[in-house]
Image (cartoon, rainbow, N blue to C red):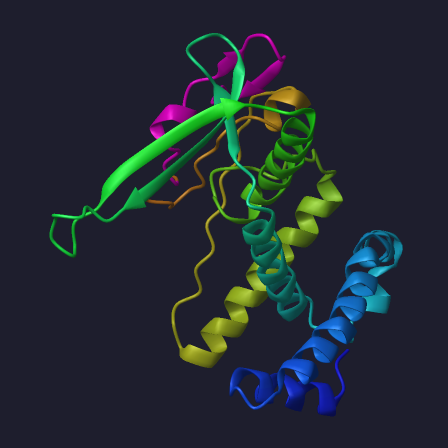
Amino acid sequence: MLTDRQKETFKDLKEGKLTAKQKADFYYRMSNILKDSLEGLEDLSLILKEISYGGLEKIDLAAAAISAMKLTEVLLQLRDPWSIGAHEDGEARAFRSWGFILPAGKPEDCAIHSISRMVTDEDIKFYLSLRKHFENIRFYVDPCFPDPVCRDLEYIRIQDEKAFQIAKDITNKTGKPLSVSIKTYEGRIKIEQLQKMRWKPRGLVTCTDLPPLLEEPTRMVGRTLSIGWSQDGPM
């Protein structure tokens, strides 16, 4: 996206080689590029969702995902949203906690300061979007969260074949014994239960721990908002 000259100017900026006017001009040009690029992110998401996989074969999706995650982290740091929880007075409030250095303490000592405030409609909207994002990606982080979509048998067959093929490739490359573990629960569950349950795959030592305060569902009063996860279903 950036030209070689623009990348070179970034380097000069970091090294303190630009005058005040050069920095101002550069920031102005970069802000326009940034605005156009960020406004196009929704279009990129639409294209990725709709295009066939055959059109993505030349794209390094792993590298693109890492770059997108870095961008999300930077945007969140700039937006600096507060998390939302149920306050003891019975309403949803925004919470934030910080560690801070004690004036008379040791350099390695840190104290905790927290504060809560009333929430705006914008706070609620952003929090719900961020929480939905978290719920959508936790399947890729915690092996105890199943894919929330109930797939057909053909999809499962293809995934099993891919797993065996990757294991075979590793065995051929490293000489390690072929190893694939499969576990199937023969009972029936509802689709809505699948989207909330935790399931321990065969061979997994332990599931990722949820923070203690999130283990039980909590109901917010005043503004209707629920937080927490259900752990119903087989383990």
Is 100 rendered above or below residue 18?
above
Task: Inspect the magenta stretch and tell me whether residue 202 lies in it.
Answer: no
Horizontally, residue 115 falls left or right of residue 63, namely: left
The residue at the point 70 percent across, 73 percent down is: 27
Q: Which of 207 and 115 is in front in this view?
A: 115
Residue 110 on image: x %, y %? 21, 46
Q: Nearer the viewer, residue 218 or 184?
A: 218
Is 60 rendered above or below residue 92?
below
The residue at the point 52 percent across, 37 percent down is: 145
Quadrant in which the C terminus appears: top left
Residue 155 on image: x %, y %? 72, 46
Horizontally, residue 57 falls left or right of residue 16, namely: right
Can residue 229 be seen by looking at this rendering? no
Q: Give the range drawn in magenta.
A: 208-235
The image quadrant that residue 195 belongs to is: top right
Q: Which of 206 and 158 is in front in this view?
A: 206
The residue at the point 60 percent across, 17 percent down is: 225
Residue 41 on image: x %, y %? 79, 57
Task: Inspect the magenta stretch and tell me whether residue 210 lies in it.
Answer: yes
Q: How many marks?
A: 0
